[in-house]
Amino acid sequence: MPLGPGEEEPGRLSTRPPPTPGPSPPAASRVDSLPVAFSPAAGAPALPPRRFLSVKRMACIFFLPLTLSGFAPRAKHKAGRVAQQQARFDWSHLTPPTLKNRYLGLEVKSRCKGNPYFTLEGDKFLIFGGSIHYFRVPREYWRDRLLKLRACGFNTVTTYVPWNLHEPERGKFDFSGNLDLEAFILLAAEVGLWVILRPGPYICSEIDLGGLPSWLLQDPTMKLRTTHKGFVKAVDNYFDHLIPRVVPLQYLQGGPIIAVQVENEYGSYNMDEEYMPYVRKALLKRGIRELLLTSDNEDRVLEGHVNGALATVNMKLLHSDAFKELNKVQKNMPIMVMEFWVGWFDTWGSKHLTRKAEEVEQTVSGFIKAEISFNTYMFHGGTNFGFMNGATHFEKHRGVVTSYDYDAVLTEAGDYTQKYFKLQKLLGSVLALPLPDLPHPLLKAVYPPVKPVLYLPLWDVLQSLNEIVKSNVPVNMENLPINQGSGQSYGFILYETSICSGGLLHVRAHDTAQVFLNETIIGVLKDNSRLLHIPNFRGCQLLRILVENQGRVNFSWKIQQQRKGLIGSVQINNVTLEGFTIYPLELKMNFFERLRSATWRPVPEQYLGPAFYLGTLQAGPSPRDTFLRLPTWNYGVVFINGRNLGRYWHIGPQQTLYLPGVWLHPEDNEIILFEIMKSGLDIQTTDKPKL
């Protein structure tokens, strides 16, 4: 409800609509009139004399930290009591399809009596948000996932925007197909959801290099996420293409975007005090006019906030000190939890991580009772298709698994969970109108096992590669002179040179390297191992080093050190090797088109070494979703009809790969494994995932 006379603190914009309907007011930054703590820039003009605070308001602000610190204790109320203690929210008139005349977007309201809150068109509004990343969900399933978000009681969808996927090569942009951001935003509006956009440029998101394109690493002096000249130039060019696409989709222009985030979790990086003001200004100068936000872990808000944006926090649980730093940054402002972690991601070789539904329910109940806006991360995680996964590097490098299930509210395949039904019941109990009907579950299928009958050793396909590089010294992936000078982003890379004696090999490879003499494997280098003994042999032979990028680190200052392939020289007995042939193995769809004309061989009983295995998956007349199982295979990548489903690895925890039915053809489907260790028996399917 709008505030009464005399209750309103200086806000961002007036809450009073124009006296008669008409065009929207002139575009202005949604944060230009935030209180002094949110001054758009240093040296902002003082408030006019009529804004001087009364004794009553000064007392209100003085006691506000006590009020905010009281949010967490109130969160102890059980979920079942929320409906009895809280008036029901009626936001039926505050949905994208119903709001035709728009004057006042998402605003912050402060008051002496009661908690500060958000308003939309002057009406009190809480954000019930859920994260869905369009780039991790097959486009054909966007509507299903968004409808399920709406039917659970949520009113807002949040999404990151991955720069590395939208600009895979410098100056070459892709907003088509599964990367059609505008279509996703418009579909959210059609379904009845508002949108909070998180365009980066850095997004973390457990995606390769935190969403930054790898070609940025070509410059040895590059300082990512700073005002380094090269980084700023690249961001400006990217924003020149991205932001004009979303400007017409803002709230005051009739679209569903009610807020835009400035960068992401910069408090955990904090390398350049001028960087966050630069990103904020870059958004404003290109036409962003809705509320600006920052997002940081609860203990990094001081380092990550920026004047002119509302600070929000990320957390797992409500507790007494949850907003301690937030209160130091801003007072008398509504609280928003931008990432409420309902689960967590997995890495290869670690345990599968889960979180109890009861804990999630209890925390959301606390948010609602304390009138805290929140965003569930993730509502639906989806899949790290292809090579998009990121990595962690604490004690050692660990790639993020293919599944981004995240133990989220919906499963990787979009199925309902116990968390979903608990949250649906909870949110339904505090909303005035009944929730929409649940979309029908998507049925799964089990298909006949696939036994590959043909294979191609890696060595047989090298000459059919598009771009082969000759170099006197090894060149890392990012600096290869391919892809119009943008280098290689993902996949594998093979280095080949002739040697005429054995000895102690010294190699620095990221992330893992298989070492061969001709076609015989000698050993594997990974993590910090750099030395390998090469046995003596007669004559001269080919030294081959196959290196894989298992995912660039997506968090912390280590993103600066994520060049992949061979780094530096290769030596045997301290003698530097020269004369390399370099084969980029990006394994893009056009590569598999060329493979179809190759001379495949019958699969032997057993083959050791990297090879491609070809089989046919028979899906029948009406394909459905399924999950692949590869219990007899070791490590590699699966391709279905040329699409990269992602990695499999016997070390787990993930043991099945999600295969969307919409990516299958009726009847026969080509399935290819690139297995880098040794051949297996067959490829199985199941209707239940094992993560």
Image (tube, rainbow, N blue to C red):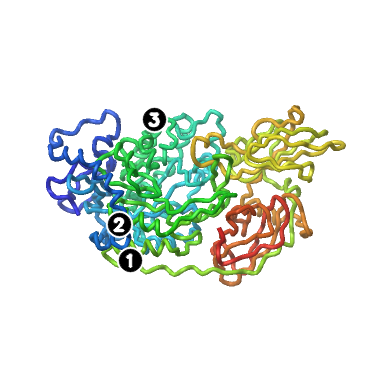
Q: Residue at x 71, y 31 (%)?
A: 472
**What label sits on residue 274 in the rendered view?**
3
Q: Which residue is mark 2?
A: 77
Q: Amino acid at mark 3?
A: Glu
Is there CB contact under 8 Å for labels 1 and 3? Answer: no
On screen, residue 426 versus residue 50, left or right, reads right
Confirm whether residue 575 shows in the render. yes
Dot 2 or dot 1, earlier in sequence: 2
Q: Residues within 10 Å of mark 3 (few under 14, many from 20)?
A: few
**What label sits on residue 435 in the rendered view?**
1
Closer to us: 253 or 610:
610
Q: Secondary structure at mark 3?
A: loop
Q: Amino acid at mark 2?
A: His
Q: Mark 2 and mark 3: span between their CA atoms?
A: 42 Å
Residue 584 position, x and y percent, is 66, 42
Residue 318 position, x and y percent, is 35, 49
Q: Residues within 10 Å of mark 1 (few under 14, many from 20)?
A: some
Q: Secondary structure at mark 1?
A: loop
Q: Secondary structure at mark 2?
A: loop
Residue 275 position, x and y percent, is 40, 32
